[in-house]
Image (tube, rainbow, N blue to C red):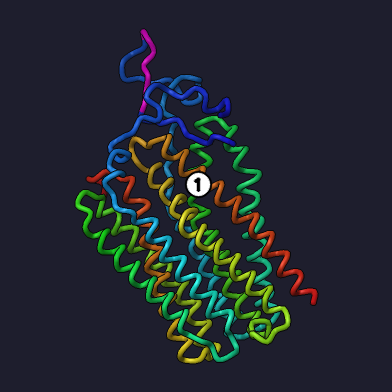
Amino acid sequence: MTDIAIETPSVVDTPPGADPGTSPPPGSGGHGPPPVPSFDIVPVRALPIVAVVLIGLVAAIATNNLWALTFFHVAGGGLWTSLDLFLGLVLGPIMGAMSVPARVEFTTRFMPKMLLIMPTLVAMTLGAGFQLARHVGNLEASYPHHGWLVASYIIVGVMAVIALGLLEPANLAVLFELKKPRPNGERIGRLMKVFIYTAGITGLMQIATILIMTFLASR
Amino acid sequence: MTAATDAAPPGFGEPDAEDLRQADLPPIMPVAIATLVFVVADGIVVAAQYGRRANLTVPTVLLAIAVVLLLANVVQLLRIRHFAWPVFYRVLGWALLAYAVFAGILEFVFVYDHTPTRLLVLFSAMLVLYALDVPLMLSYSVARWQPLDAT
């Protein structure tokens, strides 16, 4: 298991002979607090992009345009799956091996973006997916492969509970912890573990969804 | 354990004031997750019957359980005396706004598709629960780790 605990910035050891009140420079190998860069919990500048995506989604649904619905569903689902798998299986272990200051800096730059990206991708995938299935008749109970579709609902339902009940709360809690004057490094590590592992789990569950979706699309 | 975390400073991992307060907090998150499970299960049961005359007994029971759980959770939340309420309400406000937008898009889909009234009422109630329960989880998850005087 990769340990992604972050050294607490609140503990500052003053080396013997050093001036009281001074701390070793970040990354010097001492026990000084890693600097927490200034950051916005919600990256406000990216909100217009989210708005454009959501307006496009609503337009696709309102016009029932088959290409637009397919685009939002496939692009959203593909990105959602890729991000989850990349986060859980690639980025998580890399973060565990990074130096403490690098990890703190990465977290403050990365997590706010995830706060906007993931819900937007989920809305794209599920909103367009429901409308697409209704449009092509897959949603009907009389659809020959209805059982497979219900299986995909169940998988998505479990993923939704994991994402909304564990992943997103951990994401937000990490950001608020990092905003404290003295963030608790162990707590951030614990919450980041929840975030990375749940992302990996939902990513693996996404593979099951993709198997079902590609099976249905090829019938 | 990786090399990057081996050099933890003295005192690392020792509980702080927020850690010590956790034992006094009621089980808000488990109840909120249970509420979400019932809402999601309800959605699956209703969606699985799409296009035929649905039997709404099971979905109505699931919805009722979710409503009771959410209300019970709000009650136990409001009974917490020592809590970072300003932070809780600040996060709750923004989260409610965000999830109202997401729920609104889904409601639009159901209305636009001329979903039968009985199903629409159920879907709408589920969306309201979803749009209340998730912000509650987010705001509680943040506020529980904040100092009591945090704003």
**Outermost residue toward the top in this view:** A17
Point out residue B40 in the picture as x, y percentages from the top left corner: 49, 70
Residue B88 in view here: yes
Q: What element carries label 1?
A: helix
Q: In this view, does A77 lie to the left or right of B131?
A: right
Total numbered circles: 1
Point out residue B34 in the picture as x, y percentages from the top left corner: 42, 62
Q: Name the residue under label 1.
A: A194
Q: In this view, does A165 lie to the left or right of B51?
A: left
Pick the residue in front: A187 or A41: A187
**Residue B129 lies in quadrant:** bottom left
Q: Tell me which chain the residue with mark 1 is part of.
A: A
Point out residue A4 in the picture as x, y percentages from the top left corner: 53, 36
Point out residue A47 in the picture as x, y percentages from the top left corner: 48, 63
Q: In which quarter of the image is the N terminus of chain A?
A: top right
Q: Does the magenta stretch include residue B15?
A: no
Q: Is residue A12 magenta?
A: yes
Pick the residue in front: B42 or A133: B42
Q: In this view, does A158 lie above or below A150?
A: above
Pick the residue in front: B25 or B12: B25
Q: Is residue A180 above or below residue B125?
A: above
Disc 1 marks which amino acid?
Answer: Val
Give the class, few, some or many, for how many residues have Cα within 10 Å of label 1's Cα (few <14, many ≥20): some
- Magenta span: chief secondary structure: loop
Residue numbers of the magenta segment = A11-17
Q: Quadrant of the C terminus of chain A?
A: bottom right
